[in-house]
Amino acid sequence: GAAPLVPSVRTDDEEPPHPGRDVRPGSAARVLFLLKRRALPALLLFAAIAVAGVALREDLVPDGLGPWSPRPVALGLLAVAASDGVLHGLLTLALGRPYASRYRLLVDFFREQGPLAIASGGLLAAADELLFRGGVLAALVGPLGRAGALAASSVAFGLAHLIPDRRLAPFMLWAVWEGALLGAVYLWSGSLAVAMTVHALHDVGGFALFAVQRRTGWLLASLAIHGAAFG
């Protein structure tokens, strides 16, 4: 798509925005955000995790996927989306220009995504829940308790979503927080199916928003203005 119709907001000591340029070869195998940029890698990883989940379902997800209903899905999705909006606003006010610049880089990082890649990213997000909530969190509840398991699984989730670019790496902390929210949705609802649905819908919506912003500059122009004002 066309470049966002917004002015540059980079600081004087920052390099021009070329997200992904600092990514070293071979890193895609360990960074989920890199895989979510393209449809085929996302679909292959989703299939691998799904097959492993079926083969190891009693060990990986001993209680199954749990019940599913629209109400906890809607509430969980609302909580995660509201958190995104609040964090975005607070970071814009607190950090100004540096955050605005890095947010634009994040939007452009997923520039290779088409509709199929966006949908595949949603499937991979559901697989994330099978692994990190159904596997890691559930396995750690016994030895660490619910709070400890939630914290440990959230950190693991954030590290798996690290973008190996020094300008985008701080978004890993956002991923840790999002992992905590998704873990809370899982523990509150008692349903891995609910957490999988929330995560899938959230990522599809987020990637679609990025695509719209790249084509139209929607919200990016106001972010640049506010970033300049508070930076």
Image (tube, rainbow, N blue to C red):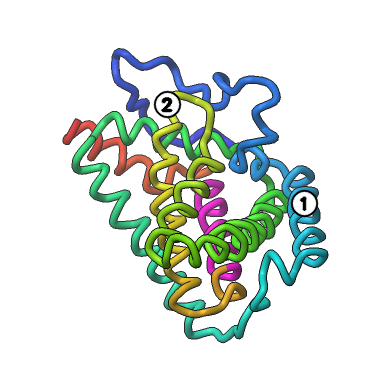
Is 38 displayed left or right of 88 in the figure? right
Tag 2 residue: 167
Under circle 1, the secondary element is helix
Under circle 2, the secondary element is loop
Tag 1 residue: 43
Q: Residue furthest front?
A: 143
Corner quadrant of residue 111: top right
Residue at image coords 61%, 75%: 193
Magenta segment boundaries in residue numbering: 196-213
Is 5 displayed left or right of 88 in the figure? right
Q: Percent position (x, y) of residue 139? A: 57, 62
Type of amino acid under label 2:
Arg
Prevailing secondary structure of the magenta residues = helix
Crowd tier of the residue under label 1, counting other residues whose Cα lies within 10 Å: few below 14, some 14–19, many 20 or above? many
Residue at image coords 79%, 45%: 40
Type of amino acid under label 1:
Leu
Position of the C terminus by quadrant = top left
Residue at image coords 37%, 47%: 219
Q: Percent position (x, y) of residue 27? A: 65, 28
**In this figure, what is the number of numbered marks?**
2
Q: Percent position (x, y) of residue 171? A: 42, 39
Q: Percent position (x, y) of residue 198? A: 53, 68
Query: Is 206 a magenta residue?
Result: yes
Is residue 114 positioned above or below 201 on the image?
above
